Structures are given as structure tokens and as C-alpha cells.
Amino acid sequence: MTNPNYIPEYFSKLKILDLSTVLAGPQVGSFFSELGSKVIKVENKRSNGDPTRQWKLEVEKGRNTISSYYASANYQKESIFLDLQDVDDYMILLSLAKEADILLSNYQLIVANKLKVDYASLKAINPNIIYAQLYAYDADDTRPGYDLVMQAETGFMSMNGHPDGATAKMPVAIIDIMAAHQLKEALLIALIKREREAAGSLVEVSLYQSAIASLANQAGNYLMADHIPKKLGSLHPNIAPYGDSYTTKDNITFLLAVGSDSQFHKLGKALSSDHLLSSTFVSNSNRLANRLEMNGFLQHEFGQRTFEETDILLAAQNIPFCRVLSLDSVFKNRLAKNMILDDVIAGDAVKSVSQIAFTIK
């Protein structure tokens, strides 16, 4: 698969040197490799490479040389192993850096300085290099950047989970992924700057601040209304019924995602319910205030219908609803299938999903 369906020739001329490990930085490297750029991944010879090479599921052991985790973030990269404390290997790194357009790093600043792979050292040999630096917090903080810690420290975990259940993290390293998107955006801006000014850049992205930037409406709820979000399961703090779940007569659970008063009005008409169309539920604020009563009534209505009947009823009125699908069902969908990438890493045929979810025509 080639995605997007229009790839500027410009990207095929770029050389990316990827010194990063784990997920955020490597995903950025994969993004450029999908665009046609040459991406060389420099891995630590002393530690047998990127640690994710060893992060195998129990079911993967004995099957592939490489882990599916590593494959998910290292699409079509040329990988070389160097010991940057070895003079000869360091000189190889310098020769690569001299020709690179972009360098990706998640070294702590103190380590980058010690290894002489910091921005100042590499800019001295390549003034036009765009040096992309990922930090956990900022340049002066030596704490490592683990996604779990970030999810906990930036409020995500305090909001995630069922009200009566344990605190939960997202099942993907969501902070790493959001930081990767911040870095992609910054690098594209830096490339425009270089085209116009013939100058390189130091691009710095913090995992912590990427997480804060992604708090969106939850941050707004706190900053403007002093509301501290609590665990709501799938419920939305600002909208109802949005994430509220119901079980049909044939014991199938589904969610509603009603995002406007007009959609709720259609729901009331579809169910032929004067009660749902009453002033008690006329506006979103009314529905939030009377959520328990609303959901009790909706459950009664849906509990008298099969899911097939409910599906036909809601689809006819274009009311947003969904079942919760596992990945074996997800990847039966044509749109999901179109995101699958095939690659060969260390002799293994591997699959991953694309870092590109856009097209340009």
C-alpha cells in the first residue's frame, strides 16, 4: 500500500537519521519512510539495539526474530548498529549526520553531550541539519520519559476507568503517539523554514507538554469551571447520551453518541416517546442533569427490542451508535485493511499500521 496517494518528490530526496528508541521518535521516522524518505536507524551496539526488539508477546516467542512492537514503529528503515563510544563507529555516525536532513533523538541532554551527538556538535558539521529532540519533561530534567508515568502525571489516568473500578491507563502509549504527532508537525514547519531561509533548526518536543496539549475540553472544564474530571467509564462529562450504554432484548450492548439536541429529538421520535420529547430532556444541559432518569427510560425502550431492530431504527434516523469491537472485528473493515503495511525486518515478514491517515489529491 502507498499512502497518501500523492507523495511529493521532495520527500524522496530527504535523508533521516533516526537515533531514537521505543515509540515516539521511531514513529516519526516511519512517517517519513512512508513518504519515501531514506531513513537510517542507528541502534546501540552495546545493548543489542532498540529495547523494543525484545518486547515480544508470549505468543510471539519462538515465531519471529523481531517483535511486533518494534515492527509497529520501524517501517522500511535501514538499521545499523553502532557503539558511539567507539571512535570508528562515532566517525560513521558523523559521516551520516553530515548528509542528513533530519536527525531524530530522544537522548537525555546529558547523554547526548557526553556522546557528542547533541545539536551543537552536529550543527558544526552540518549547519542545515534539522535536529529533532524529544524530552520527557524538558532539557534540564533528567527523569526518563515513560508513557505510563506521563499518563498518570498529566491527569489522563485520573479520568480513565469505571467510577467503581480501578484507575486505568490507555492500552496504547497514547502520550508517545501524541508527542510523535507534535514532532511531525514541528518538523514539517522546520522544513518549510529551511526552504525559505536555508537554515537548520533545533526542534524540541516534550512528552509532558504534548500530553497537556491533548487534554482539550477536559482542561477547559477545569480552567474555566474549576471542574476536576472523575472517572466516568465511557460517559462524556459535557454531552448526554454520549458514551451511555444500553442492552437490547437479545443481550447485545451498544453505545449512543448523541451530540446535539436535534439528534436527541430524532431519537425520541424514532422511539415514539413523548417522554423523551418532553421539557425534562429538551436540551443537553437538561439531559446531563437528568441523566439517570433518561438512561433508565432508554434502557427500558431498548430492552424491548433486539439489536437488529434497534440497528434498523437508529440507522434510519442517522443517529450515531456503535457496538464495542475487538481488533479481530476491526480489521475486517475495508478502511482498516487499507491501513495495513507489509515489510521485512531482520528476515521476518511483518505487518504494522500506517502512520499516515490522510490523502492529498
Image: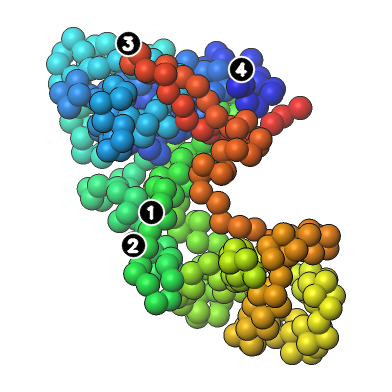
- Which corner quadrant of the image does residue 271 belong to? bottom right
Please tell me which residue is depicted at 65% across the width and 27% down the height of the picture. Answer: 4
* Amino acid type at mark 3: Ser
Name the residue beneath numbered marker 1.
208
Mark 1 vs mark 3: in front: 1
Cβ atoms at labels 2 and 1 below 8 Å apart? yes
Q: Mark 1 or mark 3, which has the lower sequence index?
A: 3
Mark 1 neighbour density, 10 Å: few (under 14) some (14–19) many (20 or more): many
Q: Nearer the viewer, residue 39 or 51?
A: 51
Q: CA distance from mark 2 to mark 1?
A: 8 Å
Q: Residue 41: x and y, percent?
A: 35, 21
Q: Nearer the viewer, residue 116 or 207?
A: 207
SS at mark 1 in the image: helix
* Amino acid type at mark 2: Glu
Quadrant where the image shows the N terminus: top right
Mark 2 vs mark 1: in front: 2
Name the residue beneath numbered marker 2.
153
Please tell me which residue is depicted at 69% across the width and 23% down the height of the picture. Answer: 5
